Amino acid sequence: MRNGNFRLPKPGLSREKNLVLILLAILVALVLWGTFWWMVRLALFVVIVYIIYLVLREYF
């Protein structure tokens, strides 16, 4: 193994970086959560329309 110029990150900078990453993860989770519920509503709408189509096709 090679012993190169390996340095541990500074604790202050690492703490700030972790805080930014945590805030970014929370923001992404909130955006995806809203998108998830929008997609669930869309899928539910498609299923309801398809069921109505099947019922109407059966009787007409």
Image: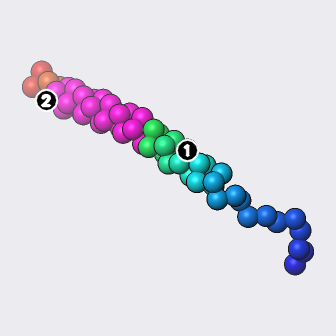
Q: Amino acid at mark 1?
A: Val
Instruction: Looking at this view, name the residue that lies furthest to the top.
Output: 60
Tell whether position 34 is magenta: yes
Above or below 12: residue 50: above
Where in the figure is residue 24, as x and y percent of width and height? Answer: 51, 41
Q: Is there a contact, CB below 8 Å, between mark 1 and mark 2?
A: no
Q: Is residue 22 visible?
A: yes
Residue at x 71% of width, y 59% of height:
9
User: Residue 56, located in which quarter of the rendered image?
Assistant: top left
Q: Sequence order check: which comes first, mark 1 or mark 2?
A: 1
Between 56 and 36, the one lying in front of the other is: 36
Of the 4 image quadrants, the one containing the C terminus is: top left
Colour mode of the rendering: rainbow
**Could you say which disc has been placed on residue 20 in the image?**
1
Q: Amino acid at mark 2?
A: Val
Residue at x 65% of width, y 51% of height:
13
Instruction: Looking at this view, name the residue that lies furthest to the left.
Output: 59
Instruction: Looking at this view, name the residue that lies furthest to the front.
Output: 12
Between 10 and 47, the one lying in front of the other is: 10
Residue at x 87% of width, y 78% of height:
1
Q: Which residues are magenta?
A: 29-55
Above or below 8: residue 39: above
Between 48 and 31, the one lying in front of the other is: 31
On the rendered structure, is 36 left or right of 22?
left
* Secondary structure beneath label 2: helix
User: Residue 20, located in which quarter of the rendered image?
Assistant: top right
Crowding near the residue tagged with mark 2, few <14, some 14–19, many ≥20 C-alpha atoms within 10 Å: few
Residue for badge 2: 55
On the rendered structure, is 2 left or right of 34?
right
Between 12 and 14, the one lying in front of the other is: 12
* Secondary structure beneath label 1: helix
